[in-house]
Every structure is written in C-alpha cells, then in structure tokens.
C-alpha cells in the first residue's frame, strides 16, 4: 500500500479545522482550501492558537510547534491540492455542493488519490454519483472535536474499493484514532447505535412513566452513563437532533425501532432547542441548569407489614432494609400492607395480575441496577400513597430513590434493552463488525461499555425477556428482538459471538 503523505482538506469550518490539526500533528503535510475567502486564514489562526497554547503549557517545544505549523499549507485554489494522496471534504451538508466538488476534485487529483467525505447524514454513494471512479470515494466521518474524539468511521459505499478502505484505515490508525468500518447505511455506525437512548427516553416521557429529570438521573446514577437522553438533546440542540431522528427513521423505511416522538416538533416550533436558546427540556440561567429539587423521603412507619416477593433478585437486601426500618415482614402477601416486587420487563400492573398480587399495595424495585446504585421504585396506577411512601422510606435508608409511574421495564431496563437490541441488529445486518460496534459506541458516544457488552453483562436471556415483555404489553413492533440476539440466547452463547462463517 502506498504511504499517504499529503492530505488535502476542503472546507475549513468546525470539522475542517480539527481534521487539519489531527493530520498535521500526525506528521502529514496538510493542504487546506475553503470557498469562502478568509475561512482558511481563520482556521489557521484557530489551529496555531491551539498549538501555541500547547507550547505555553509545555506539551511541545517551540521547534516542534514551528515544524507542525509549517506542515499546514493554506491554498487559494482547488488546483493547489493536485498532489495530495487523500483529500477529505468537510464542506456544508448539501448533496449538490458535495457532488459537484467531488467531480471537480476528480479532475484536479491524480488517478490514484482518494477522496473522502466527512458527511454525517448523506448517502456516500450519492456523493460519488457523478464521479468517474467511485471506487476511490469513501466516507470518513469524524466527531467533534476531531483531535479529542478518537474514533473515525470509514464508510465503505457500495462501489468503494477494498484498497481505498485499507488505505484510509492505515491513515486513521497512523493518526492515533480508532478506525471503524461501516456500511453506507443511515447514521452509519455511531449515530445508528445512538438512536435507542433518545427514542426510548422520549417514549418513556410520552407515556408519562417518568419526568425528564428523573430519566436523566437514572441513566447517570443507576445505569452509569455520562449523560441522560434529555441532557444530551439539550447539548446538541433539538433543532439539529430532531432532524437527525426524522431523517434516520425515514431512511430506514419507517422502521418502528427508530420512530421519533410527536413531542419534538412543537418544542422545535417554540424554540426550545436546549442550552443554546436558554431553554430546552431544562431551563438554563447563565448557562446553569435549573433542576427541580429532589423529593425528600417520608418518615419510616414502624410496624408496617411488608411482604417481599420470593422471586426478587435482591430479596435478602430488601429483607434487611425492611427489618432495619422497623417493618414487620410477613409470610403471605394477603397479610401485608406493602408488597415489594422486582419484575424484569413487566410493569407493576401486569406483574400483579400474573401473580395474583394486590396492585393497590404493590411497589416495584428495579432489579437491574440493584440496591447498591441509585434505586428506582415503580408504582401501579392504583398503588396507594400509603404503600408508596412506606416503600420510599424503607428504600431511602442508605440510598437515593426515584419513583416512577408504571412502565414495562422501569427506565433503565427498557432503555438499555433497546440500545442492546439496536446494536445486535447492526451486527445482524453486517453494517459493522462486533469489535467496531463496541469500540465506536464506547469512544464515539462515551457509553460506559460497548452496547453488546452491556447486554452481555445484564445477560442475553434477560434482555430478551425484557424486550418480549415490553412487546407483549405495548404491542409495539419497536421492541421485537433482533435475530442476532434471539439466536445467541437460544444457542446459549455470548452476544459478542460473531458468525463462525457467513456465506
Ligand atoms: P461549517 O459550516 O463549520 O464549515 C463548512 C465550511 O465549508 C465553511 O467554512 C464553508 O465556507 C466551506 N464551504 C462550503 N461550501 C464549500 C465548497 N463548495 N467548497 C469549499 N468550501 C466550502 O460545517 P462543519 O460543522 O465543519 O461541517 C462540515 C461537514 O462535516 C458537514 O458535512 C457536516 O455534516 C459534517 N460533520 C459535522 C459535525 C459537527 O459536529 N459539526 C460532525 C460530524 C460531521
């Protein structure tokens, strides 16, 4: 494989600047061009400013910085990129502009040069549609900020050659980023895998199962995510994310798993974009989020009669908490004033109906995060306030508590099962390899683990159970399990097991 030395970057905006910096730091000569006069100079100022700061902080010497800056070559015309081995396009997200640029680049570049697009939502084959040699065209999708987000997706369009993919992979590896390969499908890999957090989060608030703040709190404090779905939506801006949700849903032929929410359009119309507009799912004052205060736990009620479901995962811990809180633990649910259950995938109403329990005194405790993390309690539509408060007081001993309304799979079970299911289907469709799915989601989305590893940790059988129960209760096809998942559970192997051979 020919070694890539010279990189061209067309479009010196937010992404172009980061790409210029990344490859100059990796030792390449970088040639940059922008159609707007002054854009390249602005990008140079930005990148040199960052490099100078690195010198001030002792991260690199004066000589190293001068060499690095000397490797960046501002260009006044596209022809100046003629000698580049790889040209990366980062111009506006507009198919007409990209198609015409790619055609122009083909005329300027050597026949063995590669042309890559940083598009986040367009079909790469469409960008290459007017090219004479589409085999040398690929997607090369970076994340913002490019030098810090250490993953890049190489999009192999239907006519992209294996040699083009290999050369881009070597280039990205050489720059110290993790190169993952994805098919030319909507959202590619990272944005595809990231759907579940948003769509299921929105579905939970649509169904009035929990508040926005409670969903985010549970995803952070119980599931271990850096941010919940609504915090993330406020950061990226609902005007931007809303369009991505619609576009991926439509591009996947209205696949129910990606169905967006009717809650989004009215909020966009009202300008509730998020941080940038001062209000989104949360309100911000001087960029500080205004959270609702957490509800204080009620006082313990000594002597309350509690029955703990024998099937509860945390039976012993719940028993200890009940005793410590002065409750009287009874042997039969009929003698109880409070019933504690721990369902997987079922809401309180269904679980009580199936097990002949009195829903008026039933409260569920989410077994997924267990009791050593933030605790979730869930009530049925007829659970009494007395039973709810008694459970709250008992569970607030030594832990934080959030109470949610009846929901198949609480909050964490249903969001995590959705994320696992979508990742399993990405593998089933051969959009990317298991390793690439795992690494790209961990690095690109910052999830605490790869999505299939999250599923593996919870247990494939459990994930399947949650999805089946959600589908049974809602009748919604969005919860139908991927064949990748159900096959591996049926065979009793890890969710991370690729096909031994695929014909
Ligand atoms: P931007 O608006 O910050 O920069 C685009 C630059 O391209 C501008 O400087 C503009 O003058 C220049 N330009 C426009 N048309 C041109 C043309 N025909 N020839 C040469 N230069 C031209 O945009 P951005 O945020 O850097 O996004 C660039 C691309 O990267 C888009 O395709 C976008 O979808 C994708 N992307 C953006 C992000 C992000 O977070 N911003 C993340 C991943 C991918």
Image (cartoon, grey):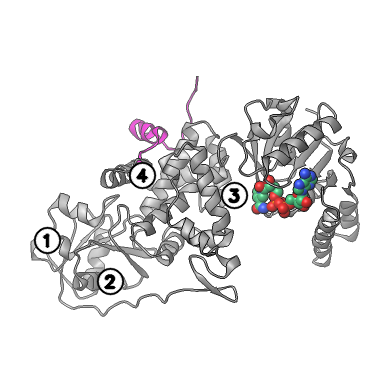
Which one is in front, 23 or 63?
23
Q: Which mark is residue 463?
A: 4
Residue 237 percent across, percent down from the top left: 57, 59
Residue 339 percent across, percent down from the top left: 18, 63
Spatial distance from mark 3 to mark 1, Cα to Cα? 48 Å
Q: Is residue 281 left or right of residue 100?
A: left
Q: Which residues are magenta?
A: 480-503
- Sooner in the amino-acid sequence: mark 2 or mark 1: 1
Q: Which residue is mark 1?
A: 333
User: What is the secondary structure assignment of the residue under circle 1?
Assistant: helix
* Residue 407 seen in render: yes
* Residue 150 seen in render: no
Residue 104 in which image quadrant: top right
Residue extending farthest to the bottom is 299
User: What is the secondary structure assignment of the residue under circle 4?
Assistant: helix
Residue at 42% from the left image edge and 33% from the top image edge? 484
User: What is the secondary structure assignment of the residue under circle 2?
Assistant: helix
Q: Which residue is mark 2?
A: 392
């Amino acid at each position: 494989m020919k070694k890539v030395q010279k990189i061209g970057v067309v479009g010196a905006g937010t992404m172009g600047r980061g790409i210029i910096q990344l490859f100059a730091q990796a030792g390449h000569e970088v040639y940059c061009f922008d159609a707007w006069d002054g854009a390249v100079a602005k990008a140079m100022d930005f990148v040199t400013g960052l490099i100078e700061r690195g010198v001030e902080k002792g991260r690199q010497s004066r000589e190293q910085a001068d060499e690095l800056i000397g490797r960046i070559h501002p260009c006044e015309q596209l022809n100046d990129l003629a000698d580049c081995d790889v040209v990366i396009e980062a111009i506006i997200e507009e198919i007409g502009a990209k198609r015409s640029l790619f055609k122009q680049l083909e005329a300027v570049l050597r026949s063995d040069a590669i042309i890559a697009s940083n598009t986040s939502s367009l079909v790469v084959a469409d960008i290459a549609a007017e090219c004479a040699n589409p085999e040398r065209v690929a997607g090369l999708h970076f994340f913002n900020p490019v030098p810090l987000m250490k993953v890049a997706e190489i999009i192999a369009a239907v006519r992209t050659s294996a040699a083009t993919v290999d050369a881009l992979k070597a280039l990205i590896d050489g720059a110290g980023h993790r190169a993952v390969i994805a098919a030319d499908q909507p959202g590619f890999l990272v944005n595809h895998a990231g759907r579940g957090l948003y769509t299921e989060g929105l579905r939970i608030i649509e169904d009035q199962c929990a508040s926005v703040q409670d969903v985010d709190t549970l995803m952070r404090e119980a599931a271990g995510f850096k941010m919940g779905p609504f915090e993330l939506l406020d950061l990226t801006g609902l005007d931007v994310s809303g369009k991505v949700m619609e576009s991926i849903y439509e591009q996947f032929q209205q696949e129910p798993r990606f169905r967006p929410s009717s809650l989004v359009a009215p909020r966009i119309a009202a300008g509730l974009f998020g941080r940038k507009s001062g209000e989104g799912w949360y309100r911000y004052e001087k960029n500080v989020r205004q959270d609702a205060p957490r509800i204080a736990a009620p006082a313990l009620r000594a002597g309350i009669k509690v029955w703990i479901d024998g099937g509860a995962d945390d039976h012993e811990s719940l028993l200890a908490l009940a005793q410590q809180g002065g409750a009287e633990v009874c042997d039969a649910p009929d003698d109880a004033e409070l019933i504690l259950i721990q369902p997987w995938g079922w809401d309180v109403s269904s679980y009580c109906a199936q097990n002949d329990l009195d829903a008026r005194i039933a409260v569920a405790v989410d077994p997924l995060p267990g009791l050593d993390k933030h605790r979730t309690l869930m009530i049925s539509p007829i659970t009494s306030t007395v039973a709810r408060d008694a459970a709250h007081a008992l569970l607030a001993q030594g832990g934080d508590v959030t109470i949610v309304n009846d929901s198949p799979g609480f909050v964490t079970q249903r969001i995590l099962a959705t994320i696992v299911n979508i990742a399993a289907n990405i593998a089933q469709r051969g959009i990317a390899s298991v390793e690439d799915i795992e690494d790209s989601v961990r690095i690109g989305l910052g999830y605490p683990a790869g999505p299939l590893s999250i599923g593996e940790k919870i247990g494939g059988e459990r994930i399947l159970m949650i999805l089946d129960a959600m589908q049974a209760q809602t009748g919604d096809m969005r919860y139908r399990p991927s064949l990748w998942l159900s096959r591996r559970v049926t065979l009793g192997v890890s969710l991370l097991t690729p096909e031994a051979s695929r014909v």
